[in-house]
Amino acid sequence: MGIKVTLLSFLFGVSAIAQNCGYVIEETITTISCNNSCDGIISVEVSGGDPPYVYTWNNAETVSSISNLCQGTYVVTITGSTGCDSIFTATEIINPDPLYVNAIKIDIFCGSMGSVSANAYGGNGSYMYLFTGYTDSIGNPSFADLSEGSYTLSVGDRSGCGADTTVFITEVDCVEPLASEAFSPNGDGINEKWSISNMNLFPNSSVHVYDRWGQKVFESQGYLEQWNGQGVFGTVPAASYYYVIILDDTDKGGQVVKGSVAVVR
């Protein structure tokens, strides 16, 4: 009469021992390497009892080691020469997670070159990346100084699984902030604040204004609130001031726009 032994394991090359009918049954499992592959292996070694042994698997195989296995649970019945059966439920073969790669690009903008950074997930970790124009795979997934064109980004993991995606680098029209040359915050309700057009295109930009001695009198992250002539130390006098606008370096290439603005009282 057979005795059912159940073993669950999810590791590569794990061995386990079970005893039935005087047998010592040792199982070794090689899991699937990549998602939806069918390259799993289960091997059983039997000692003791009454050899020779007959192997009957639930996938109709009749050998001690079965290969090219897809995801699933595999059961083997081992029968010795005296007819004692040992029904051994083998480890479930698990399908590993798919490997994915995402590309985050910055297009060519106002003279700056394009760039791509990669983000891989899933698979079996230890990612290496290969990019068009790079002869060697690298672990640092950043690629700079890219011209306009089509690029292929590939990633491989420690099991040899791979994924790829196509990235298109394009040249974006160079639209810069347009700052007015003067404003008059004198309380008459006309031209009271410093106007900078196109700032809505640069939500992560920063604006910095300095006096003639290099003292910062105003700064703003983004430009939701226009400058009204109030400085760090109160109302600024009528004079010319110098500004630096640092554009969003994530989307717009980190360009800098400089100029001057007159405060008229």
Image (tube, rainbow, N blue to C red):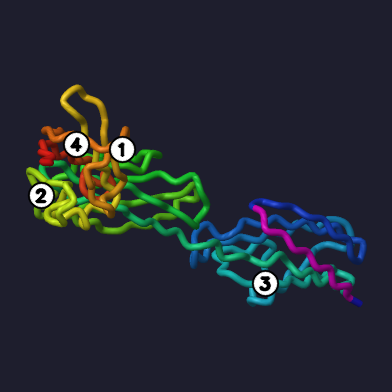
Q: Name which residue lies at 19% across and 46% down.
A: 114
Q: Main secondary structure of the magenta part?
A: loop
Q: Secondary structure at mark 1?
A: loop
- Can you give x and y, in whole percent of width and height, for residue 13 in the image? 66, 51
Q: Which residue is mark 3?
A: 73
- Which residue range is magenta in the image? 2-11
Q: Name which residue lies at 38% across and 57% down.
A: 163
C-alpha distance separating marks 4 and 1 = 40 Å
C-alpha distance separating marks 3 and 4 = 66 Å
Q: Which residue is mark 4?
A: 244
Q: Amino acid at mark 4?
A: Val
Marks 3 and 2: which is nearer the front?
A: 2
Q: Amino acid at mark 2?
A: Leu
C-alpha distance separating marks 3 and 2 = 67 Å
Disc 3 + disc 1, Cβ < 8 Å? no
Disc 3 + disc 4, Cβ < 8 Å? no
